[in-house]
Amino acid sequence: MRSQRDFQKFLDFDLLPYSSGANKIGLPEMLISPEIIPIRQEIIDEAGQIVKAFHFLRQMPLYQKSILSEGPEIVKWKPPNSSILMSYDFHLTSSGLKLIEINTNAACSLLLHALNIFNCVEQFGESSFPERLKEEFIEEIRTFGLNGSNSITIAIIDDNLKKQKTYFDFLLSQTQIESWGWECILGEPQDFILDEESGYLISKNGNRIHLVYNRLVDFLLESPNHNHLALAYLRGKTCFSPNPHEYFLLSDKKRLVDISTPGWLESLQVPDNMIQILRRTVEKTILVDLSKANELWQNRKSLFFKLRSSHSGKQAVRGKSITKKAFEHILKNGNFVAQKFILAPKLKFPQSSQEFKFDLRFYAYKDAIDLVGARLYNGAVTNFQNLGGGFASVKIV
């Protein structure tokens, strides 16, 4: 095992320089853990089955018709591409993997890959993760009808880029994409405009954007500040990956409600073997509304409340610790779900004498897993606020 001194060198490693070469980007102290988590091969295989089941479901016409009929207009535009760097996040229980959420814009994959190299951890075949990622970007581009040549320009877009603690992740992605011979522009929504005549999204210096690697957490592009992006997406001349369509089909937490509702999957003629996989991994989830107030309050200790469109554990609260005031806020909001509480597993690490909860994150494209990591934490949610916690390598045993 690497020494603490070696690990500190990794933390201090200047991942990416600014153009001046003087100031360097380092890693947030509590984002990376020195621990390595052993996970049995059968758990990896189970995750593979789950990812395939969700992708199969997502492809079913009856499923799409049922889901999209209740969504806003923007989700009904069906782009030909899918979603780069999704993740499936799980708790590992005595009865297998239990889904926490599906994330269509998961961060830190390249950082986790670098950590795996540091820890001499190999995963998923001979092709390295960056090589598979390149092929997936190419597939997105070609599926969208672009030629995938070296003239491709990719924009990585999010709000308040430089103020985010994962800003280094954007820089890593930019450097990786540029290493493939493409131009990559980091920017915020206001750095791009819609060319009304051509329908293309372009940078302010006039460069056509072929693909937007969309890192916005405004998943449906509803903000007035993102209106030009929504219009560019709907014009169908610029590829967005991920996009509102993919998010609504898989990541909106109403999907947890649908899947765990008795008879719902059966009504869509989902094959029995797929139903078994999906129901086994998705715990009972219900929409929170005023009509269920008494029932929810009485059963709160066995529930976990989540905002339907939340991310990174924001506005997620365990019912056991919820106050009456917070509960009333959730009821009035009208956009929460309540999921059966899934106890996170714990591991104690002898070398550091620390104990952490952990979850497992599987990065995937379509129906295939590319990378797996663990996230170590203490507290109610994965929060990256514990020294010694954070992303950790998973060793498949």
Image (cartoon, rainbow, N blue to C red):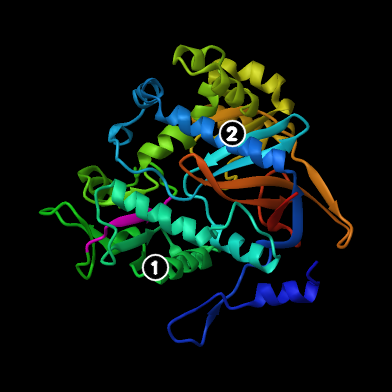
Q: In which image quadrant can residue 246 be found?
A: top left
Is 341 or 41 nearer to us in this picture?
A: 41
The reply to whether residue 252 is in sight is no
Q: Is residue 190 left or right of residue 16?
A: left
Residue type, numbered disc 2: Gln
- Position of the N terminus, as image quadrant, is bottom right
Which residue was labeled with disc 2?
49
Is 162 or 298 nearer to us in this picture?
A: 162
For the residue carrying disc 2, how many other residues have a C-alpha within 10 Å: few (<14), some (14-19), or many (20+)?
some
Q: Residue at x 43, y 62 (%)?
A: 160
Q: Residue at x 52, y 83 (%)?
A: 23
Q: Position of residue 270 (x, y in %)?
A: 48, 18
Please tell me whether residue 209 belongs to the stretch shown in magenta.
yes
Which residue was labeled with disc 1?
180
Q: Is residue 135 left or right of residue 294?
A: left
Q: Position of residue 2 (x, y in %)?
A: 78, 70
CA gap, disc 1 and disc 2: 31 Å
Q: Position of residue 337 (x, y in %)?
A: 56, 28
Where 37 falls versus 295 (above or below)?
Answer: below
Q: Residue at x 25, y 56 (%)?
A: 147
Q: Give SS at disc 2.
A: helix
Q: In which image quadrant can residue 91 be found?
A: top right
For the residue carrying disc 1, how many other residues have a C-alpha within 10 Å: few (<14), some (14-19), or many (20+)?
few
The reply to whether residue 234 is in sight is yes
Q: Give SS at disc 1.
A: loop
Q: Which residues lie in the magenta part? A: 208-216
